[in-house]
């Protein structure tokens, strides 16, 4: 089930909840936005299940990165999201774009999953009160 379908099904079952409200309850979505909050977003489409950042570089850097988070499920598991990232290096001869190493993608993924777990524990603890 893709996030778009999950969101649509939720809206059909409970017409009072909007996709935005449902997205706020999705820990992976929230955790992804919080983890990537230092980079401007190019696109964040909950129903499409994708977050794409704009190109980002540190001050005085000739290289920049772009990160895409693809949601495959709303379950809190390592198979629920995929990270795709690219690095762009510019010099006087122009710019060259390459895929980032898998270790970088894994690091971003792990940070998102860690943040999602924290959010989920906080939600469960709040519901118990």
Image (cartoon, rainbow, N blue to C red):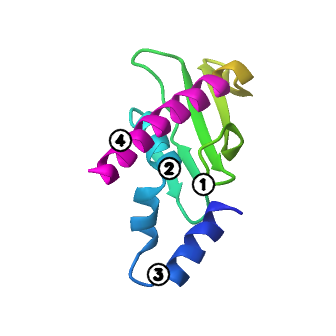
Residue 74, label in figure = 1
Q: Earlier in the sequence, mark 2 or mark 3?
A: 3
Point 42% across, 15% down: residue: 60
Q: Earlier in the sequence, mark 1 or mark 3?
A: 3
Does 115 appear above or below 22? above
Q: Earlier in the sequence, mark 3 or mark 4?
A: 3
Asked which secondary structure carries label 2, the reply is helix
The span from disc 1 to disc 4 (Cα, nearest Å) is 17 Å
Camera sees residue 101: no
Q: Are marks 2 and 1 in contact (CB under 8 Å)?
A: yes
Quarter holding residue 82: top right
Give the residue pinned by disc 4: 122
Q: Earlier in the sequence, mark 2 or mark 1?
A: 2
- For the residues carrying marks 2 and 1, which lies nearer the camera in this image? 1
Return the x and y of residue 124 as percentages of the image width and height.
39, 47
Camera sees residue 98: yes
Asked which secondary structure carries label 1, the reply is loop
Does 57 appear above or below 1? above
Quarter holding residue 94: top right
Q: Earlier in the sequence, mark 1 or mark 4?
A: 1
Is residue 73 rendered to the left or right of residue 127? right
Report if residue 34 lies within the magenta region.
no
Give the residue pinned by disc 2: 29
- For the residues carrying marks 2 and 4, which lies nearer the camera in this image? 4
Total numbered circles = 4
Give the residue pinned by disc 3: 14
Badge 3: how crowded within 10 Å, few (<14), some, or many (20+)? few
Residue at the far top in the pictured view: 60
Q: Which residues are magenta?
A: 105-129
């Amino acid at each position: 089930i893709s996030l778009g379908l999950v969101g649509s099904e939720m809206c059909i079952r409970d017409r009072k909840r909007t996709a935005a409200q449902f997205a706020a309850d999705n820990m992976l979505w929230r955790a992804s936005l919080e983890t990537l909050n230092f980079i401007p977003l190019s696109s964040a489409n909950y129903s499409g299940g994708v977050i794409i950042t704009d190109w980002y570089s540190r001050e005085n850097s000739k290289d920049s990165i772009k990160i895409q988070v693809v949601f495959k499920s709303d379950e809190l598991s390592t198979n629920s999201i995929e990270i795709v990232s690219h690095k762009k290096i510019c010099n006087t001869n122009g710019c060259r774009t390459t895929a980032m190493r898998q270790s970088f993608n894994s690091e971003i993924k792990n940070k998102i999953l860690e943040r999602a777990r924290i959010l989920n524990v906080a939600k469960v603890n709040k519901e118990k009160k």
